[in-house]
Amino acid sequence: MTAKATGGRVTGRRVRTRANLLEAAFTVFAAKGFGRVSIEQVCEAAGYSRGAFYSNFDSLDELFFALYRQRADLIADQVSAALASDGPDLDVPAAVERVTEVLLLDRDWLLVKTDFLVHAARDPQVARTLLEHRARLRRAIADRLARARGHTALPAVLGDAEAAAHAVVAAYDGVTTQLLLDRDVAGARVWLGQLLTALLTDGSTGQ
C-alpha cells in the first residue's frame, strides 16, 4: 500500500518523486496512449524503480487519474481566475477574451484527456469520478455567470447560469477535438473566443 493509504508521513523527497513520476507519465501517455503503457515504461522514463512507483501509486489507473486531476484542476483554476477579474460584475466579452488567452490548449494534454474519457466510458467508477471533476469546472463557471449583471446579460435562450456553463464546457470540448486533428492552437483560441462570445452574448460585444 502507498504511504498515503497507510497514513505515512509525506516527505519532500516523496513529493518530488511523485511529481517526477507524473511528469514522466504525461510524456509517455501522450506519446503511446493509455493502455499501451506499462509501469516499467513510466519508471524508466522517470528514472525510478518499481518500488518508487508503488510507494506513490497503487496502480497505473491511480497514476493516470492523478495526472488527469492535476490538469483538470489547473483548467478550473484558470477559468475561475479569469472570470474573477471584474469584481462584483462581469463583462462577458472581456472575460471570454481573458479565458481564451490563458486556457490550457496543449495537444499532448488533449491526447491524454481523450484517452481518459474513453477509459472512463468503459468503467462506471472512473466515469463517476470524472463527472465530479467536470461538475467542479461547470460550477466555477455557473457561479460567476450567475453574477453577470453589471455589463452583459446572458441570452434568454440559454436559460440559467447552469445551462450556460454546460454550453461553455461543450464548446471547449468541441474546439479541443478539432485541435487534436488540425493542431492549430492559435486558430483554436480564436474559434473558442468567437464561439463563447456568441453563446453568452448573442454575438454582441456591447451592453
Image (spheres, rainbow, N blue to C red):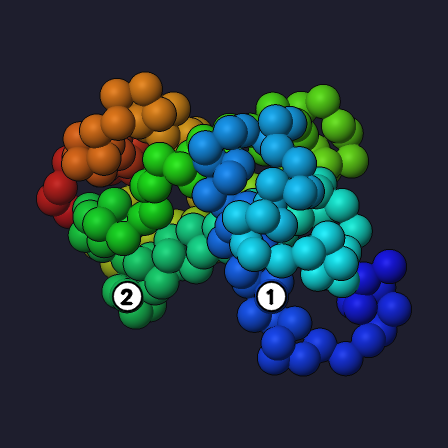
Q: Which of 84 and 56 is in front in this view?
A: 56
Name the residue type under label 2: Ser
Residue beneath the point at 65% across and 72% down: 14
Q: In this view, does 111 lie to the left or right of 126?
A: left
Question: How far is the residue under mark 1 from the one under mark 2?
Answer: 35 Å
* Residue 58 tag number: none
Residue on which the image places disc 2: 85
| Mark 1, secondary structure of its residue | helix
Q: In this view, does 190 lie to the left or right of 49?
A: left
Residue beneath the point at 36% across and 30% down: 176
Q: Nearer the viewer, mark 1 or mark 2?
A: 1
Residue on which the image places disc 1: 17
Q: Is residue 145 left or right of residue 2?
A: left
Q: Which of 87 and 45 is in front in this view?
A: 45
Name the residue type under label 1: Thr
Determine which quarter of the picture holds residue 149. Answer: bottom left
